[in-house]
Image (cartoon, rainbow, N blue to C red):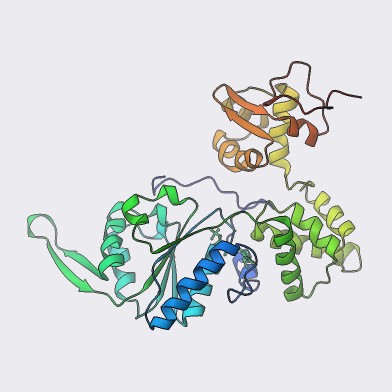
Amino acid sequence: MNWDEEPPQDTGRLVGATAEGEELAAEAALRPKDLTEFVGQPKVREQLDLVLRAARARGGTADHVLLSGAPGLGKTTLSLIIAAEMGAPIRITSGPAIQHAGDLAAILSSLTEGEVLFLDEIHRMSRPAEEMLYMAMEDFRVDVIVGKGPGATAIPLELPPFTLVGATTRAGLLPPPLRDRFGFTGHMEFYAPAELERVIQRSARLLEVETTDGGAAEIAGRSRGTPRIANRLLRRVRDYAQVKGDGVVTREAASRALAVFEVDGRGLDRLDRSVLEALLKLFGGGPVGLSTLAVAVGEERETVEEVAEPFLVREGLLARTPRGRVATPAAWEHLGLRPPQGTAAVGGPPEGLFES
Ligand SMILES: Nc1ncnc2c1ncn2[C@@H]1O[C@H](COP(=O)(O)OP(=O)(O)OP(=O)(O)O)[C@@H](O)[C@H]1O
């Protein structure tokens, strides 16, 4: 992706994976403070623990760390934990905020020894800044260009050793020379429901909201594998339980609350369901072209493709084929509909779907 391309935002959706504004403050209160509090991601946690312990034992700074994974899985949280575990200060910025090499030079030259620099959306940095970063990561040095044209001169600037923590939605988006300069890459996976239940129970304790196991399980099942969404749904269910019930987050309260907010049992919201419904009811399950589908649901093509579809594909409800979008048998089942005979559903309908 090019740095000047704004990806379609999913903020404002209850099940959107990105966050902004006031929500960030609410999130800060729920962040785990060290690796033992960080739920799930056992591989990344174990690997990072080793990297940080070794760096502490050497008395040096930790290697540069790249964290890849979908929004809301805990990359920012991990970067704060890295700084805390190293007893170092942290500076937080993002790729889109660094459009000129000079922006990066200003940040790098003000770092203190051992400081952690968290660079979110590192794949959206400008090319000149990216090239400056190569040298800074490898040699702790940058060349600041003074002047323009033939008279321009490069003034070398020594930097104190620092740890760069880069975050990206996909490591594959990074040019190999940048990727190769990280000493450790942690791939963050979507969370299993049992892990999300632990995230929810932990957050409920911090928010001082009584939550039953059933309540946590109900929210976890609708949280799309993402702690950020789990925490957000918990806050809405808490509201509902306080206004309509006795304040306890039970399975029933969660299920009623999320019905009010139009998040179904699998975590699909109105947009997701309208895409699926159009695909099934208007186009017999497809194949249908993306543009036609977008017109049918009254959304931009990009919104359908980049906001709704990834989750539907991940859930095995929709397939992208060369001939167009196709509903899977699971989609028919999820919406409680029967596919017409001879449907083009990918993989064919599951056994028994035509019965009754
Ligand atoms: N493993 C975890 N255990 C407990 N809470 C978590 C965990 N991971 C994330 N969270 C919570 O989820 C919320 C979002 O996490 P965070 O901001 O770290 O995600 P992110 O991957 O950096 O997202 P983005 O890419 O959008 O910045 C925070 O409130 C955080 O406390």
The residue under the point 58% across, 73% down is 35
Q: Is residue 241 above or below residue 1?
A: below
Q: Position of residue 31 (x, y in %)?
A: 62, 71
User: Within the image, what quadrant is residue 271 found in?
Assistant: top right
Q: Is residue 208 above or below residue 228?
A: below
Residue lying at the far top in this picture: please name it: 342
Which residue is at the front of the view, 349 or 225?
Answer: 349
Q: Is residue 108 left or right of residue 152?
A: right
User: Within the image, what quadrant is residue 279 found in?
Assistant: top right
Q: Is residue 103 left or right of residue 120?
A: left
Q: Is residue 3 above or below residue 54?
A: above
Q: How many circles with numbers are drawn on the protein?
A: 0
Q: Position of residue 94 (x, y in %)?
A: 43, 61
Q: Quadrant of ligand 1?
A: bottom right
Which residue is at the front of the view, 209 or 352?
Answer: 352
Assign the N terminus to one quadrant of the image.
Answer: top left
Q: Is residue 159 above or below residue 6?
A: below
Q: Position of residue 343 (x, y in %)?
A: 73, 19
Q: Position of residue 353 (x, y in %)?
A: 83, 27
Assign the C terminus to one quadrant of the image.
Answer: top right
Q: Is residue 318 left or right of residue 178?
A: right
The residue under the point 32% across, 71% down is 108
The residue under the point 51% across, 79% down is 84
The residue under the point 50% across, 52% down is 169
